[in-house]
Image: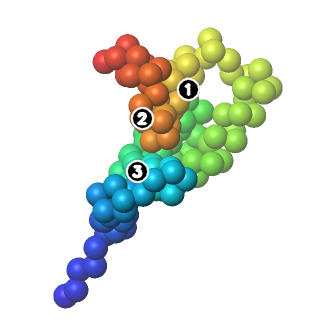
Amino acid sequence: MHDAPSTAELVEAVKRFIDDTASPQLTGHAAFHARVASNVLATILRELEQRPGAEADEKDRLIALLGADADTPLDALNRELCKRIRSGNMDLSTDGLLDHLKTTTIAQLSVDQPRYSGLALALQSRG
């Protein structure tokens, strides 16, 4: 049986090439673009690693918060949450809403901006 490299392994290999081989030989705009490419690949790696679990957790929280069926897709749950907030049926006094919003935001920042100083503080306060 042939085992192909995983998507994460392929992305990591390209990132290592950029970081270890290409970038040290570049200057100016090319060096800047190599850093941007490396950062994009790092984000993709975090997406592959963290997003599935974060979305599963988010869905579980929304099902409980909204009293929804377990087979409801995540995007539909989020649309329903937005609808209830816009209509005034839910607000920050709704039990569990603020925790859900904070937890979801922390998960998103962990993927998009893991070095954001506010994220470290939020993680520390949740510890």
Tell me the amino acid under the disc marked 2.
Answer: Pro
The image position of residue 37, as x and y in percent, is 48, 56
The residue that label 2 is drawn on is: 114
**Secondary structure found at label 1:** helix
- Alpha carbons under labels 2 and 1: distance apart: 18 Å
- Alpha carbons under labels 2 and 3: distance apart: 10 Å
**Above/below status of 57 relative to 73:** above
Tag 2 and tag 1, C-beta contact below 8 Å: no
Q: Residue furthest right?
A: 87
The residue that label 3 is drawn on is: 42
Q: Residue furthest bottom?
A: 1
* Res 54 → quadrant: top left
**Secondary structure found at label 2:** loop
Q: Residues within 10 Å of mark 3 (few under 14, many from 20)?
A: some
Tell me the amino acid under the disc marked 1.
Answer: Leu
The image position of residue 66, as x and y in percent, is 60, 33
The residue that label 1 is drawn on is: 101
